[in-house]
Amino acid sequence: MDIFGIDPRASSAEKLVPPTPLPHVSRRALARVRDRIEAPTTCPHCGECVGLVSNAEIYNGREYGDWPYVYLCTGCRAYVGLHPDTDLPLGTLADEETREARKSVKPGFMRICRERFGGDRSAAYSWLAERMDIETKACHFGFFDAYQCAQAERIIYESMTGRRARP
């Protein structure tokens, strides 16, 4: 069942009613999303309300992307994008510190993914999850907080260089 209480694989003629401001929500797109997480309603960083808005609210009035929608905190302005053609978040709300941490560690991860796993991100995430001692389904940069990003960065650095990272 999706958040509307409808099985996204159903062939029902019943139309999905998208939340504002989304133009539509696709049953097929909803069915493709594995390991769904709940849409945020309260910000974990500051406790304020979270709303579904166009990403133009983040990017000074200009929309970016084919599906330009985000969940945005009204207080600290933490945000997270959506899976295309759905109202499902891509990860957890990220404040500026978390966004910067995610961005800084991702290139090293992608390098390991390419060089050691032939571009197989699932295998690379499984490798990282084992070293971080977390479940594979919880191992994704879109779910990480700043601390987990730092932990992943140390693991990646040590794996790439063979040297111990500084704490």
Image (tube, rainbow, N blue to C red):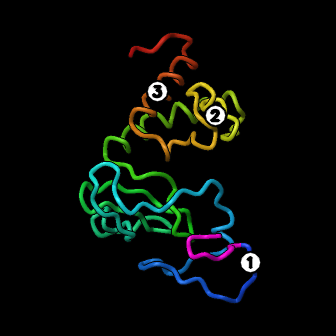
Q: Is residue 98 left or right of residue 6?
A: left
In the rendered structure, are the residues bearing label 2 and label 1 in contact, judged by CB atoms less than 8 Å apart?
Answer: no
User: From what the image shows, is residue 74 above or below residue 98?
Assistant: below
Predominant SS along the magenta part? loop
- Name the mark on residue 10: 1
Q: Is residue 122 left or right of residue 167?
A: right
- Name the mark on residue 151: 3
The quadrant where residue 61 appears: bottom left
Q: Residues within 10 Å of mark 2 (few under 14, many from 20)?
A: some
Question: For the residues marked 3 and 1, what is the alpha-carbon distance in whole angstroms?
Answer: 41 Å
Identify the secondary structure beneath mark 1: loop
The quadrant where residue 48 appears: bottom left
* Relative image position of residue 73 (x, y in whole percent): 31, 60
- What segment carries the magenta color? 1-8
In the rendered structure, are the residues bearing label 3 and label 1 in contact, judged by CB atoms less than 8 Å apart?
Answer: no
Q: Earlier in the sequence, mark 3 or mark 1?
A: 1
Which residue is at 45% across, 34% downward? 149
Q: Check disc 2 and report the residue beneath it.
A: 113
| Of residues 116 and 164, the one drawn nearer to the viewer in this rendering | 164
User: From what the image shows, is residue 151 above or below residue 78?
Assistant: above
Counting labels gives 3
Q: Is residue 52 magenta?
A: no
Which residue is at 50% across, 62% downward? 82
User: From what the image shows, is residue 80 above or below residue 12?
Assistant: above
Q: Residues within 10 Å of mark 3 (few under 14, many from 20)?
A: some
Q: Amino acid at mark 1?
A: Ala
Q: Amino acid at mark 2?
A: Cys
